[in-house]
Image: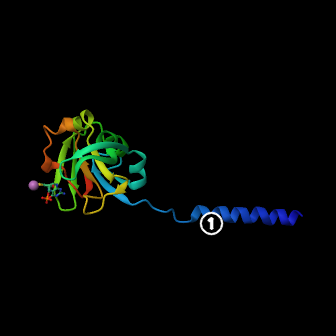
Amino acid sequence: MKQKLLFAVTLFVILGFLIGCAPKSESPVLLKVEGKVKGGSYTLDEATFEKNSVERTIDDPWMGDGLKYKGMLLSKFIEVVGAEADASTISLIATDGKGIDIPIEDAKQWEIMLVHWADGKVLDEKTGGPVKIAFPKEAREKYKDEQWMWWLTTAKIK
Ligand SMILES: Nc1nc2c(c(=O)[nH]1)N[C@H]1C(S)=C(S)[C@@H](COP(=O)(O)O)O[C@H]1N2
Ligand SMILES: [Mo]
């Protein structure tokens, strides 16, 4: 009886160890963040991104009005990546080398969104994924249609 118990306990310990060592299923990287962030760099994965995401109905000058977009607001992004107190600008860079600089002041004032889902589906290359930027109505005076950058993969906090 004692032996059986010992066996069961040993099995449990070994199983626990194996489960603990199993490679974690990794969440895909959405944005590499560099510059003035805690620790010098930050890798924003999809799981963390989703946890901090919100949904908004947005009129997209390129894709149409009233679209259900889900993503991270830039104000949240600054918090999550740990932007340093003296940072003033978020520079977002796309795979084609194009980019946009957004003052952190604007990010605090307006709900500027890093979009990763549209109508429940992940943005693909055709629709501007993995991440594209979307501006709310109130910010359109400053940010023109041409500045709705797609294919964002890097952010530099300056
Ligand atoms: N990453 C990225 N986003 C971008 C662009 C671009 O070249 N690269 N072009 C912008 C401009 S100038 C326009 S007019 C629209 C539409 O681009 P298109 O005419 O190439 O479809 O996307 C905007 N977003
Ligand atoms: Mo354009």
Q: Is residue 2 left or right of residue 12?
A: right
- Residue at point 13%, 44% (across, down): 144
> Which residue position is annotated with label 1?
18
Classify 24 as above or below 49: below
Q: How many marks?
A: 1
Q: How is the image coloured?
A: rainbow
The kind of residue tagged 1 is Leu
Residue 140: percent from the left, percent from the top? 16, 39
Q: Report the quarter where the N terminus lies.
A: bottom right
Task: Pick out the residue farthest to the right.
Answer: 1
At 77% from the left and 61% from the top, the residue drawn is 9
Residue that sits furthest to the front in the current view: 65
Q: Is residue 25 left or right of residue 91?
A: right
Residue 158 in sight: no
Q: Disc 1 on helix, strand or loop?
A: helix
Place residue 142 in its image quadrant. Answer: top left
Q: Nearer the viewer, residue 30 or 144?
A: 144
The answer to whether 102 appears left or right of 40 in the picture is left
Is disc 1 surrounded by few (<14), some (14 to 19) or many (20+) residues within 10 Å?
few
Residue visible at 51% across and 62% down in the picture? 24
Q: Position of residue 147 (x, y in %)?
A: 15, 49
Residue at x-position 32% and y-position 48%:
69
**Furthest-top residue in view?**
109
Residue 90 lies in what quarter of the image?
Answer: top left
Q: Position of residue 49 (x, y in %)?
A: 38, 50
Which part of the image, by quadrant, shows the C terminus? top left
Q: In which quadrant of this rendering is ligand 1 seen?
A: bottom left
**Can residue 110 be seen?**
yes
Which image quadrant for residue 151?
Answer: bottom left
Q: Is residue 123 above or below residue 86?
A: below
Q: For disc 1, does the CB lie below 8 Å from ligand 1?
A: no
